[in-house]
Image (cartoon, rainbow, N blue to C red):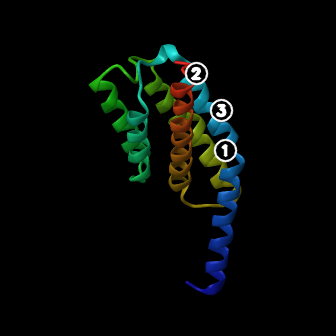
Amino acid sequence: MTQSNQLQQQSVELKIQQEIRRCEDELVIWIQEALDNKKSYGKLEEAQFRNLVRVADTTDSPEVVKNFLRYQVGRDQKWGRGKDSLAERIVGDIDGNIKKAAEAIAKTTTATDTKQIWMELIRRYLGYGARYLKYLRDGNKI
């Protein structure tokens, strides 16, 4: 790779990070709205949510994240059940809002790897969720 190509790639990466930071408020709002719907899930514990965050941190596949989440639903009711569950809300955000945001960022920045951007947004979304769940649990709001 030539120095010119390297500089161009670095410029695209910087722009991607700027655009990701620009949509952080939306990520926070989406996960907080999901967690505020307390009827959609059971006694979800921080450790269980952090396990989901760890899975997202160790994969480059949105499908792996969704698969793990659905596995958790099959194990117990802490993530909720059915189409109105917290788990399905998170999957819906991953496939809907978050994917659309990733596609918009890729288009704006001329990035070629939308999936990488999508995963970065998923990781942040879930990370903000872990923080918010901590607040809800320790604030005795649930």
- The residue under label 2 is which amino acid type? Asp
> Does 96 appear above or below 64?
above
Q: CA distance from mark 2 to mark 3?
A: 10 Å
As drawn, the residue found furthest toward the left would be: 75
The disc at residue 36 is 2
Q: How many C-alpha atoms fall within 10 Å of the one at disc 3: few (<14), some, or many (≥20)?
A: some
Q: Position of residue 71 (x, y in %)?
A: 30, 32
- The residue under label 3 is which amino acid type? Ile
Q: Secondary structure beneath disc 1?
A: helix
- The residue under label 1 is which amino acid type? Glu
Instruction: Identify the residue at horizontal 38%, vertical 46% (top origin).
Output: 55
Q: Secondary structure beneath disc 2?
A: helix
Do tag 2 and tag 3 residues touch (Cβ < 8 Å)? no
Q: Is residue 29 left or right of residue 129?
A: right
Out of 80 and 135, give the one closest to the viewer.
135
Q: Which residue is mark 3?
A: 29
The mark that comes first in sequence, 1 or 3, is: 1
> Does 131 appear above or below 13?
above
Instruction: Identify the residue at horizontal 62%, vertical 79% (top origin).
Output: 5
> Does 73 appear above or below 4?
above
The mark that comes first in sequence, 2 or 1, is: 1
- Classify residue 36 by image quadrant: top right
Instruction: Identify the residue at horizontal 62%, vertical 39% (top origin).
Output: 27
Q: Quadrant of the N terminus?
A: bottom right
Q: Which residue is mark 1?
A: 24
Residue 84 seen anywhere in this rendered image of the structure: no
Q: CA distance from mark 2 to mark 1?
A: 18 Å
Out of 105 and 71, give the one closest to the viewer.
71
Q: Position of residue 63 (x, y in %)?
A: 39, 42
